[in-house]
Image: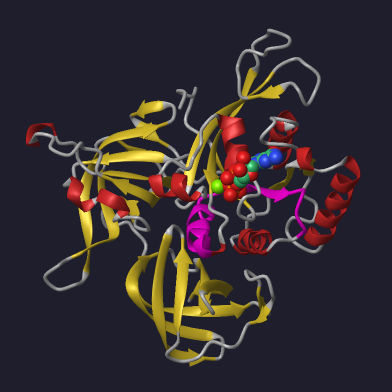
């Protein structure tokens, strides 16, 4: 990745059905292919939430060709003016990876919904991802009508009309639709211009105590490194609010499982480094993906073991729940499958899957009173009061999104 002029100020997510071109669009804009894990390369799909950062510049050419990710314009040869630094959060579109999509979507301020022009509209995860955006309160959406290179002009127009009809009555009703080909780099400048015009940087809360959602956690030491060269555990995630500085004391919740009693235990450490795509920083602000170096034993952070945890200053984190009461609103139909299945009421003792922030957990319903359900969680979650959780139920082979719950 190139070193960017400053820390990203906004997170923009991809959304849409598998193979419609989410990762290709991110690659065409940023030059980074986000799916780099061996399993992803083998299966040719995005599995883990990926991210790639870039800067948008605007030069004096006619629009939309005045928008690009390069400072020096190839045409007018002038230096463009820096507009924004963006972090793209690229999510998987396969139906079995909805949980990962929700973890990524929890970090975003706006989204590019990608719809392939050569397929019927809507495909199941086009519908499911749009509903997830709606549920998470993401209102700033631009639609990319991708793969227009594959079909004749009249079919592109027909497909455009179908997209228009599909988004009617949804949060994306007024979203601009940009026809493009990510693979051929066609109309990418128009997409960038549309993102600049329609997905505004929200005002971030820098005053509150910091809260970072962990999306990745690693051990960056090479196997066999000598003990005196070992680097502490690293957490990757996005700061929702507040500011972190190198040297800050931190607490991580719910933390790790204490093998002696099987209970989750908070972890305390200190920030030893902060990195963003603008390089190493002394101080970081909300947005963008941040690599937070700690003094922790790297075995605690290896292999994404702390994904879903929240990092803040000691004793300043929100509540950790082992059992939660949720005020539930169910959808009429479970929309992630090709056929729309009616959502039945939640029953006592049934198992549900819950996503909140980047955390995912499962739980068993222990009590129901009207629309308030109590769930015993298998793995605790740390979340602000009134947080919105995505509720999924196993229907057939897959977990399907069936509703939302607000912690009450
Ligand atoms: P994702 O699952 O939504 O992330 O989709 P990918 O970005 O992995 O793309 C799926 C497939 O579609 C890949 O083989 C891409 O090369 C191809 N693809 C993406 N964009 C275009 C496009 O604009 N035109 C054509 N013809 N193929 C594309
Ligand atoms: Mg992908």
How many numbered tags mark residues here?
A: 0
Using the image as rendered, state which of residue 268 and residue 60 is in the foreground.
Answer: 60
As drawn, 192 above or below 303: above
Using the image as rendered, state which of residue 278 and residue 158 is in the foreground.
Answer: 158
Q: Looking at the image, which residue is at 87% across and 53% down?
A: 161
Percent across and percent down for residue 304 are: 32, 52
Is residue 112 a member of the stretch shown in magenta?
A: yes
Q: Looking at the image, which residue is at 36% across and 76% down?
A: 377
Q: Quadrant of residue 24?
A: top right
Is residue 228 a member of the stretch shown in magenta?
A: no
**The N terminus: image quadrant:** top left
Using the image as rendered, state which of residue 25 and residue 236 is in the foreground.
Answer: 25
Percent across and percent down for residue 334 are: 63, 75
As drawn, 229 above or below 215: above
Q: Which residues are magenta?
A: 96-121
Answer yes or no: is residue 179 visible. Answer: no
Q: Residue furthest front?
A: 42
Q: Residue furthest right?
A: 154
Q: Looking at the image, which residue is at 64% across and 18% down?
A: 81
Q: Looking at the image, which residue is at 51% across and 78% down?
A: 393
Q: Quadrant of residue 88?
A: top right
Direction from residue 376 to residue 75 in the image, left or right = right
Direction from residue 216 to residue 179 in the image, left or right = right
């Amino acid at each position: 990745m190139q070193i960017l002029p400053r820390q990203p100020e906004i997170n923009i997510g991809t959304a849409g059905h598998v193979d419609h071109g989410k990762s290709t669009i991110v690659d065409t804009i940023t030059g980074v292919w986000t799916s780099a894990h061996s399993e992803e390369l083998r299966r040719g799909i995005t599995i883990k939430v990926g991210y790639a950062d870039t800067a948008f510049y605007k030069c004096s050419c006619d629009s939309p060709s005045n928008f690009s990710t390069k400072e020096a314009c190839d045409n007018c040869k002038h230096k463009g003016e820096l507009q924004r630094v963006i972090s793209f959060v690229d999510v998987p579109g396969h139906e079995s990876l909805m949980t990962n999509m929700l973890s990524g979507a929890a970090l975003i301020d706006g989204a590019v919904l990608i719809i392939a022009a050569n397929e019927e509209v809507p495909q199941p995860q086009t519908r499911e991802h749009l509903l997830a955006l709606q549920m998470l309160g993401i209102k700033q959406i631009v639609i990319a009508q991708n793969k227009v290179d594959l079909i004749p002009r009249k079919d592109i127009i027909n497909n455009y009309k179908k997209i228009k009809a599909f988004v009617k009555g949804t949060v994306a009703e007024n979203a601009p639709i940009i026809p493009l080909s990510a693979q051929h780099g066609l109309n990418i400048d128009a997409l960038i211009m549309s993102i600049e015009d329609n997905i505004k940087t929200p005002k971030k809360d820098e005053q509150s105590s910091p809260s970072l959602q962990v999306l990745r956690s690693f051990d960056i030491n090479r196997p066999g490194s000598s003990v005196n060269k070992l680097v502490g555990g690293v957490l990757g995630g996005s700061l929702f609010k507040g500011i972190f500085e190198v040297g800050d004391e931190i607490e991580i919740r719910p933390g790790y499982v204490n093998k002696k009693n099987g209970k989750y235990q908070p972890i305390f450490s200190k920030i030893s480094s902060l990195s963003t795509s603008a390089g190493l920083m002394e101080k970081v602000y909300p947005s963008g993906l941040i690599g937070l170096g700690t003094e922790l034993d790297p075995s605690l952070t290896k292999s994404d073991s702390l994904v879903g945890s929240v990092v803040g200053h000691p004793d300043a984190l929100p509540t950790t729940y082992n059992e939660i009461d949720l005020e539930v609103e169910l959808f009429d139909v479970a929309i992630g499958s090709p056929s729309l299945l009616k959502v039945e009421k939640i029953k006592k003792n049934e198992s549900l899957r819950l996503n909140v922030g980047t955390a995912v957990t499962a739980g068993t319903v222990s009590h129901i009173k009207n629309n308030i359900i109590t769930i015993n969680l298998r793995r605790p979650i740390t979340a602000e009061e009134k947080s919105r959780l995505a509720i999924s139920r196993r229907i057939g082979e897959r977990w399907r999104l069936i509703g939302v719950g607000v912690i009450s």
